[in-house]
Amino acid sequence: MASLHRPERTTMGGSLEIPRMLNGLWQLAGGHDDKVDILAATAAMDLLIEAGLDTFDMADHYGDAELVIGQHRQQKPTRQATAFTKWCPAENGIKSFEQAEAAVDRALTRMGQGLTNVDATHLELLIRSGYSITTNQVSCSVIDRRLVRGRLSHVCAEHRVGILAYGTLLGGFLSENWLGQDEPQDKQTLNWSLRKYLRFIHTAGGWASFQRVLQVLAAVAGKHQVSIAAVATRWVLDVPVVSAVIVGSRLSKDSGKYTASNLAAFSFSLDDEDRELIVRAQEGLRDIPGDCGDEYRRPPFLTATGDLRDHIKGSDDARKVSEAIAKGQRVECRSGGKWEAIAGYSRAVRIGDTIQVSGTTTYQSPGFQSSSKCIGGNCPRSQTVAVLDIIARSIKKLGGNMSDVVRTRVIIRNEEDCQAVSEAHGWVFKCEGIRPSNTLTTAGLIGEEFLVEIEAEAVVGSGAFVLLID
């Protein structure tokens, strides 16, 4: 290990020092190996730690990953390692503070430490709400450029949020193994990561465009006498807001074979000529739609299966709503807010295919703990995003989607907030591919902390086909 290049290091949150390359343990979740040997995995951790790669990234649904970390801490309590984990809540309708607390406690019990990350789209919302965010974990590669071409990099730079970038090597596609090769036709022969990132390649322009980028990476790699993976990793490391990259590790007896290759990313620098060559090759790519993380939020779902079956489990709500509507019944959705019972109203009501949503503000839901008085703080843009999130949840509970919205009524306290509120409203519905009819006006809202209130109407199924008439 003494001859290996040592990774660059960075400091997170003012005190936590980590290498700029993290060991991603997604591959322990299944779809790569049938069974994880926990003892062999803990031994593999030692080799990585000795090489300076002493930080590990996982989530509560990454198979035995948290258990492996906990086992290592028991066996080697004096060997320092840092582990980041994430809680991925089930879509079971339970969103209480107690549920979140129990999930964090479970991770702490398994590992002895824990850290959750945030969703890219709502990073600014959380910050404006008073939460201190240190890192945000998103996909970033020479193929997936949403971080650098979208708004997220500017938000991270403004608020000093470091990016932990995954997908840097597209699950292994960015390597010599795929240079000049035909596109794989039988996806069942691919592991989960390759199935997932093949969808990224398709969305970004297809196999031919990918091969052109790969050829340029190979030329740059030859110039510096490193691998394609090292060049692809270095490109991401050089993105100003990227604190570290996450490189997949199976933590097996063979893990050490890849350590030297991974660390080669710290052995050289890309010069202006290299960057220009890469930029020219990227001109043949298409932008992956949406913001970072949208691959898990809306079509096209860029997952191993092409949908969310491995990430979101259905609930009985949809079935109950469908049965009630088929019987001609009225369905009311209640959020549990105190004013609903006092004033006698529901968050939303569905009759037939029509859903009507009450005037909605960024009220504090149970368990909301922040220095801010309401979600979104005093930022009109963030409050608008939070309000539309609440509306989206109520419409979803009643069997619809935001793409079914046909009308919104937006009420703002201050006329000078019109631009920010309108931009947030426009961004939300641009993501849905529709433009509902809309009214925006000013009024004296009740509660000085609230800057915006929104009503909405939706017709279930109306967003399936859109005809534009100019």
Image: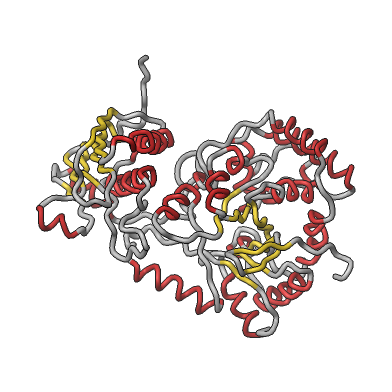
Can residue 325 be seen in this snapshot? no
Residue 75 lies in what quarter of the image? bottom right
Percent coordinates x, y for residue 32 in the rendering = 65, 59
- Residue drawn 59% across the image and 44% down it: 147
- Residue drawn 58% across the image and 49% down it: 157
Give 352 or 262, whichever is nearer the viewer.
262
Instruction: Using the image, determine if residue 220 lies above or below residue 462.
Output: below
Give 57 or 268, whichever is nearer the viewer.
268
Task: Decide if residue 150 is on the left or right side of residue 263.
Answer: left
Percent coordinates x, y for residue 310 in the rendering = 49, 55
Can residue 5 be seen in this snapshot? yes
Percent coordinates x, y for residue 266 in the rendering = 80, 56
Instruction: Using the image, determine if residue 58 lies above or below residue 125.
Output: below
Instruction: Using the image, determine if residue 154 lies above or below residue 403.
Output: below
- Residue drawn 40% across the image and 61% down it: 90
Q: Quadrant of the N terminus?
A: bottom right
Percent coordinates x, y for residue 366 in the rendering = 28, 64
Task: Decide if residue 98 is on the left or right side of residue 15.
Answer: left
Task: Decide if residue 206 is on the left or right side of residue 63.
Answer: right
Q: Quadrant of the C terminus?
A: top left
